[in-house]
Amino acid sequence: MRPQLYVCCPRCSLVGPPERLDYTIGVLGENVDWDQPVAWQCAQCGHEADITEGDVLPEESSCACGTCGRAVECPADAIRVTCMGCGSTGPGPAAADPEVAAHLRAVVGLHAIELRVRAALPDPHP
Ligand SMILES: [Zn+2]
Ligand SMILES: [Zn+2]
């Protein structure tokens, strides 16, 4: 599996696995080539940004995957994590904080409304 990169979203301030991540694999075959642009999209609110190596949070914590039980390394602030073993996404260490969990629900709910509004409006670039 390709490396997971956890970034604190500049818009919703939540930390989680990205919705979309476009990067070039470096010469070693396993690391991200940071000399190339890396496009990132927040899975929580849909915000898109170009990220640099300095935006990536260290995986200094871990939690157990809710599906296969394997330990998932992640930042302590991660609200959601993706298991490298089975690929499923579940709650991260930060989800135990009720305030953060409520913020996640609000952000995800707002993003769902945004998507519905966008789908209902005529395409500005037909
Ligand atoms: Zn976000
Ligand atoms: Zn798993």
Image (cartoon, grey):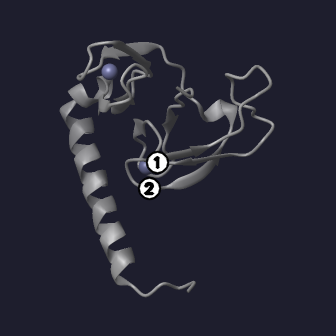
Distance CA(mark 2)–CA(mark 1): 5 Å
Find out whether the residues at labels 2 and 1 contact each other: C-beta distance under 8 Å: yes
User: Any atom of ligand 1 within 8 Å of the CB at mark 1?
Assistant: yes
User: Any atom of ligand 1 within 8 Å of the CB at mark 2?
Assistant: yes
| Element type where label 2 sits in the image | loop
Q: Residue at x 52, y 29 (%)?
A: 4
Q: How many marks?
A: 2
Q: 42 or 14, which lies in front?
A: 42
Q: Name the kind of residue labelled 1 in the image.
A: Cys
Q: 58 or 1, which lies in front?
A: 1
How busy is the neighbourhood of tag 1: few (under 14 within 10 Å), some, or many (20 plus)?
many
How busy is the neighbourhood of tag 2: few (under 14 within 10 Å), some, or many (20 plus)?
many
- Per the image, the residue denoted by label 1 is 42
Query: Percent from the top left, x then y, of residue 64?
Result: 29, 15
Q: Which mark is residue 46?
A: 2
Q: Which mark is residue 58?
A: none
Q: Residue at x 29, y 62 (%)?
A: 112
Q: 42 or 107, which lies in front?
A: 42
Q: Residue at x 59, y 52 (%)?
A: 49
| Element type where label 1 sits in the image | loop
Q: Name the kind of residue labelled 2 in the image.
A: Gly
The part of the image, by quadrant, that contains residue 5 is top right
From what the image shows, is residue 97 above or below residue 100?
Answer: above
Q: Quadrant of the C terminus?
A: bottom right
| 7 relative position to 38: left or right | left
Query: Percent from the top left, x then y, of residue 92?
Result: 31, 26
The part of the image, by quadrant, that contains residue 23 is top right
Query: Percent from the top left, x then y, of residue 65?
Result: 29, 19
